[in-house]
Amino acid sequence: MDFDLDQRRATLGVGEFAAFSLGPHDAGQAASGIWRAQLGTQWHNTLREQVAASHPAAEFEVAISGQIAHRGWILQLTGRIDQRLPAPTPTPGPSRNPGAEPEKCHVIRDTPTAPSQPKPVILREIKTVLRALPADEAELRRDYPEYFVQAATYLILHRLSVSAAGCRAELMFVEAGSGLAQSIAVTPQDEALQRAQLERVVEFLELRLRARERLRHLNFRPAFAAPRPGQESTLHDLTRTFEKHPAVLFEAPTGFGKTGVLLEFALGQLRSGHFERVLYLTSKSTGQLQVIHQLTAMTAPGAPRTSNPTGDLRRDPPDDDPSAAGSGVAVWHVRNKAEHCINHTFHCVRDNCTYLHDLETRWSKSGLARFYRFENQTRDLATLRAAGQEAQICPYEITRAALAFNDVWIGDFNYAFAPANRGLFYLQPGFDPARTLLLIDEAHNLPARVADAHSHALRSQETRALLAELDHLRAPAPLLRAWEDLCRLLAALLPVDELDHALEADLADTLHTVVNQIGRQPLDYAALGPDFSDQLWRTQELAGWLDHPGLKKLLWCPREGELAFTCLDASAVISETLHAYGGVVLASATLSPTDEYTRAIGFLPDHSTATVMPLPPGPDPAVLRAATPWRDGAYDVAVDLRVDTTFQHRSRHYELTAATMVALQEAARGPVAVFFPSYAYAEAISQTLDRIDGRLRCAMQPRVRDLAAQSAWVEESLALADVLLLVLGSSFAESIDLLGGRVSHAMVVGPALPEVNAVQRAKLKEFSPLGRETAFRRVYQIPGMQKVNQALGRLVRAPGQRARVLLHCKRFAEISYARLLARDYQFGVNVASDADLQTWLHGKA
């Protein structure tokens, strides 16, 4: 839907208009929807050939458009009716192959018409369904109301454009498996449904108009009541940079206040009318919670109003000012579907879930529309779950229904970049990326996260279990044979770094055969169960993955009977997504080296490989770096040349590493943080430390994801332990902001280079045209040193905080590694002996 609120006009397709819903609607199964569409096209083509042969005057895919006025709004509707035929006198009745033979199809006879008037026609819309036909007409009207609205809309538009008596419309339902057809005439009752649909669309437009007026009077506090040095001009600099470059890389260290700057910038853009909506996406839920907290503080009632970029403040308007009502910003924090689920087992098959059954009918009486009609409703996850439980409606459907009416959507990267998740955003009514401001925080994680979202795996054990279940359910023989072929292929696989081309071709053929059979043989997915259904649907994703032109891919076998579909580089699809938005700001503490990052998100061409998707048109991103004078001299850094922490040599230095940790803690006289590349390395040193000096109390980072549990562990460890053993790249190293000002000494045990495996070797091969050193830098050094910079940035988060940091590996002194350190950590002393270490530890910082 495209709309102009000032002109009170909207443009949308007839199908979109008919399916429009303010409440929840059946989104269908994403994967099954693909083959449903393919199967529908197949039957459309078959019917077209049959009708064209018997009725030369018939027309197909006829464009119909027109304007309909309702409550002061003009809706421009466009679409294509499947068939337009001379008005027939039908002999109704189901047929196996409609249009093929007189005894098996509707018999069409010409109806005499006065030659001076336009000839009456029948408009036929064809819909493929999985249910058995013929069915009771009342059931079809109940289950497919949008189809009748669509056909009625075509009829109304046709009457507006052609003055012809006797024109009518019908719906032809076609059973997907057999081709059996059943036609139902459009009635005045359906035209009444069309008028009710007009009311739904106009209600949505009125709510969007109300939201825009509210945003024009948006009140919010500045992000910083008393800006730190460097913060005073950052908002101005970001705004000015953005005016010239609608794509900005914003780099600022941890603790600078990036979240506040981004939110104040975004709220200003909303109020000025430059954008209709803001998406604030992060890679971790911890970041999203921080955004919610900051945004709540900035937009709470009674906030002083930031009026314009010059910075003068105005208090809230008086109570009798019309702009005072509803002058906040509507925010929705999107959590994943599993977190919403109130079933004992998470699995979304509508026929098997009481909270989804007959959802559209029950919604109108549930009272849940309050979550988008009234802006003062609490909408945290606990509230949504409680409301859904009370109404016996899936809480995730509340999110889906209410999201379109909110100004700021906060969520994970996946909702914009992952094929399996992006539908939640992109299928919202009125959502237009071109009118949306996209803010990406923790943007250094974006390339890897998107590549992961485009990676998959198949395992022989799982496919064989599904084969047994299909056999138990007596699935059609062709589908069983196709799935058995896939099982045999997987069972024969042995560990290998790359699948050979012949086997890859066999895999593609087998997957496409399975996908075709799924389309022709509908199954009872509720009986099949959640895991098996997901596995079966996933084959369509895998077939599409093999055919995707924009991904750099690797097919390999990490172990016997397992096939990994790994995306090596998703820069082309990242670029395609980013270029669709009206404005983009990518923020992080670690975007440097920015030329490499710009290539990783597809904004610069990468000439390292032969074939890539062409870059969408658009300006290159500008780079804005925040000024942080308070960090100057805050780090006292030393590089330990005594140790080689490479995988081949690190075990020789276990005792020296442990002894260095003892010396570091003694100098600190308090808890110290030691960062390792992996859990295994940290555990090995912990055991060594216990052996040589059992006095130190070590706390090993636990494997937990819950933010509250992580924070509790950090607080407890700072109070009770001498050494905190942390893993680079984990949430403890990149998301927990409790170490600043509380840990005076820290140690990084080697660069956190990625594990050497088939994926990294494939990446090296991909970048080999650039030269060995450049390829190694891209694949290993940049990701590893980025983790080091992220961890160290959390030690100094505010003016007055300081930290002594020992980079415990001689590689940190090599120029190729040293230049990848952030500026604050690049200049320090070299420790070549035990005496040098003591001098540095006890010297003046």
Image (tube, rainbow, N blue to C red):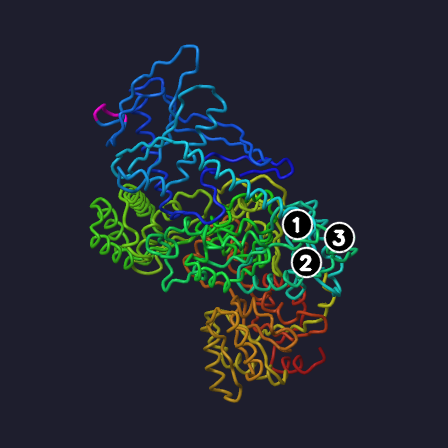
Task: Work out how far the residue at label 3 is from the one at label 2, CA to CA, in angstroms.
Answer: 16 Å
Mark 3 or 2, which is nearer the eye? Answer: 3
Residue depth check, mark 2 versus mark 1: number of the one nearer the observer? 1
Q: Which mark is residue 261?
A: 2
In x, y percent, where is residue 511? 31, 46
Q: Nearer the viewer, residue 367 or 339?
A: 367
Residue 737 placed where, x, y %? Answer: 60, 70
Q: Residue furthest bottom?
A: 695
Local packing at callout 3 (Cα closer than 10 Å; few below 14, some 14-19, many 20+) is some
- Report the span colored magenta: 99-103
* Numbered badge on residue 307: 3
Q: Which label sits on residue 132?
A: none
Residue drawn at x 61%, y 83% is 670
- Earlier-in-chain disc, 3 versus 2: 2
Q: Which element carries disc 3, helix, strand or loop?
A: loop
Q: The residue under label 3 is which amino acid type?
A: Ser
Kind of residue indicated by mark 1: Arg
Of 555 and 811, the residue lying toward us: 555
Residue 214 numbered tag: 1
Amino acid bearing label 2 = Val
Q: Residues within 10 Å of mark 1 (few under 14, many from 20)?
A: many
